[in-house]
Image (cartoon, rainbow, N blue to C red):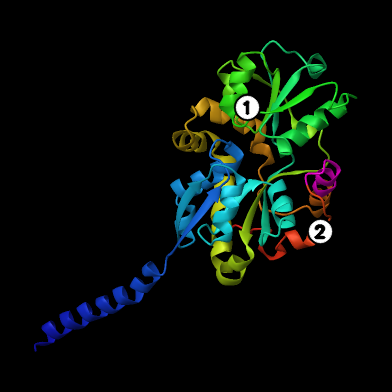
Amino acid sequence: MSSISRRRFLLSASGAAVAGALAPAVRAQTSVKIGTAVLGDYALAGPFIVAVEKGFFRMENLNVEFVPFQGGPNLVKAVIAGEVLLGAAGSTDILVFREAGMPLKMVATHTEGNHFTFNVAPDVGNVAELKGKSIGVTSVGATTWVFARMVAKAQGWDPDRDVKIVGLGGLNAQLAALSRKEIHAFVWGDGGAVTQLAGKSKVLMRLDKVTPRWISQVQYVSEDGIKKQGDDIRKAMKGIFSAIKFMTEHTSDAAEIVAKKIGWSPEAVLAAHKISGGLMSHDGTVSMEALRSMQDTLLEYAVIKKRLPVEEHVAREFAPVKLGG
């Protein structure tokens, strides 16, 4: 073999060796599923959508499939079964499902405060006008039901006599009842911005006006997932909070991304951002005082029956999430 041929051979061999060394890093990318309790909530689903579309999960060497569910109970089942690594849902789920014996742990605050909205018929000017009328909620005993009762109490009303609180299910059912004047208000998330933009209802207030210290939405995982996939959980969370940072700094660009997936107009997404964008957590830190306040409220309204130690609900080792740069 000539010296030139030998050099070519060695260069080729060294290039193959480098490619071979890099190949395992590509193949090592982990595939996981993450999910939200619903799709039609900007603060809840938006960060998941943006993290996928902008490649924030890929930057953490994760191949992520985002799966929106039809409600919290279905998401919980998937997380416990190991089908979904990390889920995000309304915060009361962690208190309710752990009381029921579900092996879940909260790993981060997703949305702070209370981003739920109190929505009224277009001709209603204030809460006082609702005395003696009906308020729609998803179901009796749900978080929306608790909030409706808290609105009534804040007015000095008896929530069992001075208003009628009606369990109706999803948003379409609420709007249909509102149009028929069977109800005059309903409790919903930041999706109230969409129906307001369509002229079907209007957002009277965000419900942090009537709730004590609160956490609106949380991220949780299974206890088994913590044992087996702790690093993957951290990577997924880093991707989500990188997306929240992007949504804060590039809101219009993020709105275009979210609108395509969620089925809202970009204008509706921006309206939802005005409601809840400022409440999205930037590092997942959990306020134990807020969690205790929520537990007190759920006990008062008999949504849960037992006072479990609040610390048992949270895996504290995952937050705050630190982002590079």
Mark 1: secondary structure: helix
The residue shown at (56%, 41%) is: 38
Contact (Cβ within 8 Å) of mark 1 with mark 2: no
Mark 2: secondary structure: loop
Q: In this view, does 55 lie to the left or right of 237?
A: left
Q: How far apart are marks 1 and 2 (CA)?
A: 33 Å
Q: Quadrant of residue 311?
A: bottom right
Q: Can residue 182 be seen in this view?
A: yes
Is the residue marked by circle 2 packed among few (<14), some (14-19), or many (20+) residues within 10 Å?
few
Amino acid marked by disc 2: Leu
Was residue 21 drawn as part of the magenta stretch in this picture? no
| Outermost residue toward the top in this view | 123
In front of the other: 27 or 54: 27
The residue shown at (60%, 57%) is: 323
| Outermost residue toward the right in this view | 156
| Outermost residue toward the left in this view | 1
The residue shown at (81%, 28%) is: 151
In front of the other: 258 or 228: 228
Instruction: Pick the quarter of the image with the C terminus.
Output: bottom right
Q: Residue 254: percent from the left, percent from the top?
A: 51, 38
Amino acid marked by disc 1: Gly
Depth check, mark 1 against mark 2: the one in front is 2
Work out whether 302 lies above or below 63: above
Q: Residue 30: percent from the left, percent from the top?
A: 44, 65
Q: In which quarter of the image is residue 261?
A: top left
- Tell me which secondary structure the magenta stretch mostly adopts: helix
What residue does disc 2 label?
308
Mark drawn on residue 192:
1
In front of the other: 322 or 120: 120
Q: Residue 145: percent from the left, percent from the top?
A: 74, 34
Magenta segment: 294-303
